[in-house]
């Protein structure tokens, strides 16, 4: 019966802003993309405000908070600047991620176990403000346990390594990584955490990930924005939604 539980789809619209910023104009508008995603069946919108503002900007977060009718998942590093913005805007959720200025995209999970005291203090006012706090982590038990210990409501498991192995045709390694994700999801669920997953998910690998019964949400961005170039954003999201639903049985 677990597989029949609907799986939420969060659409990350960061790279609509990347395209906009390439020309330094106001188009394409990330808010318009978010509204289109909502119409196409997205259950939430994710936007990552990076320290260097390479794509999403502060004004985008403000516009999204005011302009969409589905939950906003504000993704950011655990800095004082981002905490202050979250406390001012009070999004539905905040997902804390590791961030290095020189990386192209988020390269791994947050080391919650190695920074648990600071992170516990950091998320306390966010929790008090009613914001759901998520930790973007790998599937290691120590990171899952630390996330539960500091009071996070959610963990989002990093599926990037599995996605890379799958795309490269390294089937044995991919299956081992997928099994580790399954075990991590089950363990996180047993600790009372809500379990999400994201990073590198495509039409080709979504079925295997979506079939993990403890998952309640997938967050997908870059692939959907890329497919939108060919299909349109609405049809790209609708196709992903269909594949997720089929994988849940």
Image: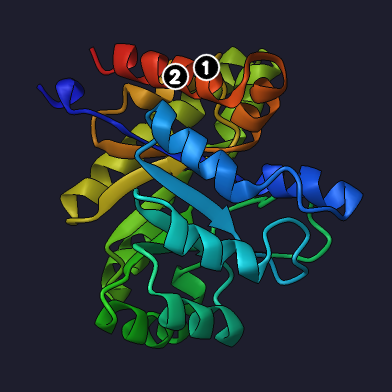
* Residue drawn at x 44%, y 82% as measured from the top left: 88
Residue 124 lies, with reference to residue 169, above or below; the image says below
Crowdedness near tag 2: few (<14), some (14–19) or many (≥20) residues, C-alpha within 10 Å: some
20, 11: nearer the viewer: 20
- The label number, if any, that marks residue 29 in the structure image: none
Secondary structure under badge 2?
helix
Residue 170 lies, with reference to residue 49, above or below; the image says above
Crowdedness near tag 1: few (<14), some (14–19) or many (≥20) residues, C-alpha within 10 Å: some
Judging by the rendered image, the residue that carries numbered circle 1 is 235
Q: Is residue 35 left or right of residue 50?
A: left
* Residue drawn at x 57%, y 22% as measured from the top left: 202
Where residue 159 sits in the image (x, y, percent)? 52, 37
Q: To which quarter of the image does residue 168 belong?
A: top right
Secondary structure under badge 1?
helix
Report the quarter where the N terminus lies.
top left
Q: How far separated are the C-alphas under marks 1 and 2?
A: 5 Å
Q: Is residue 10 left or right of residue 132?
A: right
Judging by the rendered image, the residue that carries numbered circle 2 is 238
Marks 1 and 2 close (CB-CB < 8 Å):
yes
Where residue 2 sits in the image (x, y, percent)? 14, 26
In this view of the protein, can residue 218 be seen by the observer?
yes
In this view of the protein, can residue 116 be seen by the observer?
no
Where residue 165 sits in the image (x, y, percent)? 64, 24
């Amino acid at each position: 019966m677990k597989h029949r539980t609907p799986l939420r789809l969060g659409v990350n619209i960061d790279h609509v802003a990347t395209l906009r910023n390439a020309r330094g104009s106001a188009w394409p508008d990330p808010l318009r993309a978010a509204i289109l995603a909502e119409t196409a069946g997205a259950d939430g919108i994710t936007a990552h405000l990076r320290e260097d503002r390479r794509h999403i900007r502060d004004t985008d977060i403000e516009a999204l908070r005011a302009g969409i009718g589905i939950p906003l998942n504000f993704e950011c590093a655990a800095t004082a600047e981002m905490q202050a913005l979250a406390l001012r805007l009070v999004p539905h959720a905040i997902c804390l991620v590791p961030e290095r200025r020189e990386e192209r995209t988020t390269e791994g999970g947050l080391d919650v176990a190695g920074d648990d005291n600071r992170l516990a203090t950091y998320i306390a006012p966010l929790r008090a403000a009613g914001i759901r706090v998520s930790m973007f982590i790998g599937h290691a038990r120590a990171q899952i346990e630390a996330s539960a210990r500091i009071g996070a409501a959610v963990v989002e498991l990093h599926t990037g390594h599995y996605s890379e192995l799958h795309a490269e045709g390294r089937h044995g390694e991919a299956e081992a990584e997928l099994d580790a994700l399954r075990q991590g999801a089950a363990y996180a669920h047993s600790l009372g955490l809500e379990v999400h997953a994201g990073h590198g998910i495509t039409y080709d690998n979504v079925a295997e990930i979506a079939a993990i019964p403890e998952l309640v949400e997938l967050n997908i961005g870059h692939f959907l924005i890329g497919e939108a170039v060919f299909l349109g954003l609405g049809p790209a999201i609708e196709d992903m939604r269909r594949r997720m639903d089929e994988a849940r049985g």
